[in-house]
Image: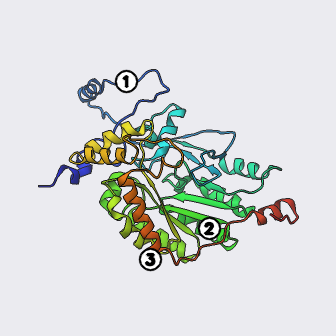
Amino acid sequence: MKRFEDNFFMSIHHRGRGAQLQAKNKYLNHFHENEAEYLEHCHLENESPFDEKTHFQEIFPKTFVNKVSSPDVGMGYSANPYQGCEHGCIYCYARNSHEYWGFNAGLDFEKQILVKKNAPQLLEEFILKKTWQGKTIVFSGNTDCYQPIERKLEITRKCLEVMVKYKHPTGIITKNSLILRDLDLLKQLAERNLIRVSLSITTLEEKTRRMVEPRTTTIKQRFKTLETLAENNIPVNVMMAPIIPGINSHEILKLAKKVSDLGASSIAFTVVRLNGAIAEVFKDWIEKTYPLKAKKVLHLIESCHNGNLNDSRYGTRMKGEGEFAEQIHQQFKIARLKYFSGKKKAPPMSNFLFLEQKNGQYKLF
């Protein structure tokens, strides 16, 4: 007889979703909590208690490129075509940002997607400002720019066309194989050393992927994506992020070897932290998904953050500290020495071509 944990999709209410509850939004005064009464009403009226559809709403922001002030994120400017993400990764730090829009960090984050169709226009206006010096702009950073709706709307592709047009340094963070649709544009940027891709691969196990990242590209397809990008000379960093103690922490060395063999130029990682409403969402999920080891996993996460599920201190919040975190650090140190020490690194991206085209003259930096 299979254990409860091995029957994930038969044991939850919201199939194909990461979060299993509508978390409270701290910015809202009213919240309906009587779930039992609501379910009973739906039973009597022969209605479905859950709307499992994903809803898309166009918004009209005045700006698109954001300056990143956090000193330990590794990027200066980000651009996100979408708010909310249908991928449904249970650990996603971007969940909290959905509260600013009047939604919640739980199911709303996965089902209420805000779409910025005017993003390409705003992007072009931004980079043509007289004061703009062509610093690298990273697509995603908050939510995935290649989540499923991108296949239809092509907002990210239109933004990349702008970047190609102006020879602008570009970064992309994604876990979706849809990025290969835009291989033609990526190759044009790569020819000028103007592109870096960070591909998120968190596990070797498809079962784990389905549990933790329910609507993302399969692991097999993600490996194929990495291989294809590398074959086309597009520098790819693999983000093993986050490492969740007791879930995927045992896979570090095997996964590092696999992605190195497929052409990754480097690897990076973060240790999961459950800040804000994510703690409530994650705890509910793990108790339903991994009931036999939920307490152990939560305890291990706390051991990486000085006894808490979250650490907000720059420098330590994403790397963790303590004995278990140190084990993770050592494994990555070994992985880099063993599988990446001989990798040829691409030279740093430059804004030279952008400024040459924009200003019509050469400038030295």
- What's the amino acid at mark 1? His
Residue at point 77%, 62% (across, down):
354
State which tag comes first along the sequence, 3 or 1.
1
Q: How many other residues sit within 10 Å of disc 3, few (<14), some (14-19) or many (≥20)?
A: few
- Label 2 to label 3: alpha-carbon separation: 22 Å
Which structural element holds mark 3?
A: helix
Q: Nearer the viewer, mark 2 or mark 3?
A: 3
Compared with residue 350, is residue 20 higher up or lower down, i.e. above or below? Answer: above
The residue at which mark 3 appears reads as 261
Query: Which one is closest to the eye, mark 3 or mark 1?
Result: 3
Q: Which mark is residue 186?
A: 2
**Structural crowding at the residue carrying mark 1, measured as other residues with C-alpha within 10 Å and reported as few (<14), some (14–19) or many (≥20):** few
Q: Is residue 96 left or right of residue 9?
A: right
Q: Is residue 340 above or below residue 139?
A: below
Q: Which amino acid, mark 3?
A: Asp
Q: Residue at x 20, y 47 (%)?
A: 292
| Residue 196, percent from left and from top | 60, 65
Q: Distance from label 1 to label 2 (Cα)?
A: 46 Å
In the rendering, at what x and y percent does residue 54 appear? 44, 43
Upstream in sequence: badge 1 or badge 2: 1
How far across and how far down the image is residue 310, in percent?
Answer: 42, 41
Q: Where residue 260 sits in the image (x, y, percent)?
A: 46, 73
Name which residue lies at 64% across and 67% down. Answer: 185
Is label 2 in a helix, a strand or a loop?
A: helix
For the image shown, how many numbered marks are present on the structure? 3
Per the image, the residue denoted by label 1 is 32
